[in-house]
Image: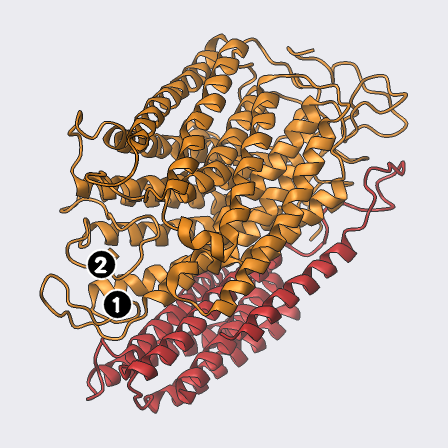
Chain colours: A red, B orange
Amino acid sequence: MTLAGAYAAVGSGVVLWGFLVSRLRARSWQTKGATGAVHEGGDTTLPAARIGLWTFLGVITSLFALFIAAYHMRMMDGMQHGDWIHFPVPKLLWVNTAVLMLASVAMQWARGAAEREALEALLGRLVLGGVLTGAFLVGQLLAWREVRDSAFFSPANPAIAFFYVLTAVHGLHLLGGLAVWARTVGRLTIRDGRALDVRLIVGLCAVYWHYLLVVWLVLFCLMLST
Amino acid sequence: MDYVALADRDHVLHDPQTFITKYIWSQDHKVIAIQYALTAIAIGLVALVLSLVMRLQLGFPHSFSLIAPGDYLQAITMHGMIMVVYLLTALFLGGFGNYLIPLMCGARDMVFPYLNMLSYWIYLLAVLVLVAGFFVPGGPTGAGWTLYPPQAISAGTPGASWGIICMLVSLGIFIIAFTMGGLNYVTTVLQARCRGMTLMRMPLSVWGIFTATILGLLAFPALLVSAVMMTLDAVVGTSFFMPAVVSMGRAPTHAGGSPLLFQHLFWFFGHPEVYIVALPAFGIVSDLLSTHARRHIFGYRMMVWAILAIGCLSFVVWAHHMYVSGMNPYFGFFFATTTLIIAVPTALKVYNWVLTLWRGDIHLTVPMLFAIGFIFTFIHGGLTGLFLGNVTVDVPLSATYFVVAHFHMVMGVSPILVVFGAVYHWYPKMTGRMTNDTLGRIHFWITFLGVYSIYLPMHYLGILGVPRRYFAYTTTDFPASVQQLNAAITVAALIVGAAQLILLFNLVWSLFKGTPAGSNPWRATTLEWQTPDTPPKHGNWGPKLPVVYRWAYDYSVPGAAEDFIPQNVAPSESVPAGYSHGAVG
């Protein structure tokens, strides 16, 4: 991290603050005599689950950004001390990446079916998305085994350690998504899908999957480029 | 889906039917708040006892043999971590956040009640894992609350085998619990406010808790990252933080790890953590001062902006905790600058609190005493922060008692005074009964004068150069007054510690014998005092949600029949009879 980066962070904070200030200019001490002119309840009519998900994505962003910052700082240190030893990223990760992309596409496809309330098509596409995600996770485990069996494997090598940590943390987030996915599929299977707000649930699942795909692409590029 | 329509449905979504669902596995935000508060206070008492044991050792090193040097380090570590994370963070956000957000925003509950319930039980699990550290082989970690590597996981440090693992696992669990709760607080504030409750009509308590929650959601991941990586260093022999060292005559397998990386991660969490504790206190104290001075908060809009500005800036000051880590001097300059900049919005808040009191109709109630006490201690702690924010002053004072005095005044004593004030203020709403006024005043004066007796001399010790974290000072060149002061501080600490029993007794006694409070004993404007029932029942508002017509600070409005106008009173209405009903006139 450079000093310029630090000042950029302050600058961003000031811009954000300016934005907030511009939004928060109401002279609330002046009672205007009516509520409706200013506000009709919650600040937004967005469903709570959607706001909750986006807030959670903010938390995930912070988590992975900090992991990436730690990766970068440790790599700089390690290259200076000579304990950061590059290793060839398993080729299998390319296949896994493609599978996760397909999973994301399937989720988007399911989202389209949910929008049209085509429940039969929805179930099939959701199952496809979940199965592909499961395949991705199995592929990641196989990649773990490949690295463990390679000549480069050593816990003391931070490049190897970061490979395991980053893939594990990303995989855990996908597992969390799969838990919601399983609950949704279960409810769609045993109950009338029309009783569920499938548009919302599947839409949020799709957003989560796309987001974790982007996170994975960033992590994969990071590991490939260093 | 429109929230208001959902909230006004005839039935509530999770109506508790049995004792278990009502009081144990409850999804009611008020019950969860009290569960959080009681758990936090219980573990906080453990930390209080640890501090008294440490004080006995420091004040009378030759009279007591309660603890060995290793135990002292363990006590200091557990005291710090419990007070900062498991007491203050949990109490302000899990306790007051849970209780106040839905009530002050005019909502029936948190938007994700089940997640809210899980948040508490996972928090309890985190506390239990932390406490388990006392019973594992080697005891809890003695690495200091900052858990710096390499000593945190090196042989020779107390608790370096099991204790540190308990601590790291517990922190990880706590962060999961906090995230669940935090998502609730943020979403509820953004989405579930009642009609008319604009962002700029929210009481400052909600603003403080809301902003602190966002800070927590963004900052706690840094602690999680460092906890995960340090656990791996300790358990599987990775070298994220562990450098190549010779430990106890042996060279472990670690090589090249960066302890500085840990410090950056830790303080990227650690400094916002100060504001995670302070911002709710700022918000709550604003409401206490305004209510009990019968005067609108001075500069409301400025207060909101100051909270947001402090929140933003709190992410770019972390390395002022690392001036002595050998950092690039330009970094020191940068972080000193940001640290001094953050004093500007903070000072604005202090001026506004004082100006709120100016020409107010001040009622020296117990909550007001604590709120005014907070202004004193916070100004005191804040001013010493300006000393330590400057690199050249910080370097000689680093790791001395001056630092201990500073951070205890600013983020220990000050927020705790607000907690006490808030407990006295909202206890009538939570229980329907007033606390005993005389006991409350005795509790305040002993605590307020006592904390000054403890921490004022510590500044002097620090300026003399007395280092912190030492079990005993044997042959030193310090004047004899150092030990005499240490003994006096210990006596004061014991008195202050014992005085907290007055509070506990008052809370329990008042539950059964307290004067009935009525619905709005402080004649306050905010929504939580306008509930149809006291304590509020499940769902808070009866059949219809309130509608808000004004900000939260319409006190002593010229021409009004009463000296307060609740937020849900329309401009065309007068204050209905019964709003001013209560035990305190």
Quick check: B135 above or below B265?
Answer: above
Instruction: Residue at 49%, 77% (x, y): give it.
Output: A213
Label 1: how many Cα within 10 Å (few below 14, some 14–19, many 20+) = many
Q: Are marks 2 and 1 on the same chain?
A: yes
In terms of secondary structure, where does tag 2 sit? Answer: helix
Confirm whether residue A196 shows in the render. Answer: no
At which x and y percent is residue B549? 81, 35
Q: Is residue A33 left or right of residue B116?
A: right
Q: Closest to the observer: B323 or A121?
A: B323
In terms of secondary structure, where does tag 1 sit? Answer: loop
Confirm whether residue B386 shows in the render. Answer: yes
Amino acid type at mark 2: Ile
At which x and y percent is residue B63? 17, 24
Q: Is residue A172 left or right of residue B561?
A: left
- Circle 1 is placed at which residue position? B242
Instruction: Residue at 40%, 18% (x, y): give it.
Output: B499
CB atoms at circles 2 and 1 under 8 Å apart? yes
Could you give the CA–CA distance between mark 2 and mark 1, rounded to whole angstroms? 9 Å
Amino acid type at mark 1: Met
Of mark 2 and mark 1, the one earlier in the sequence is 2
Quarter assignment of residue B237: bottom left
Q: Closest to the observer: A17 or B353?
A: B353
Label 2: how many Cα within 10 Å (few below 14, some 14–19, many 20+) = many
- Circle 2 is placed at which residue position? B153
Q: Which of the chains bears the disc numbered 2?
A: B
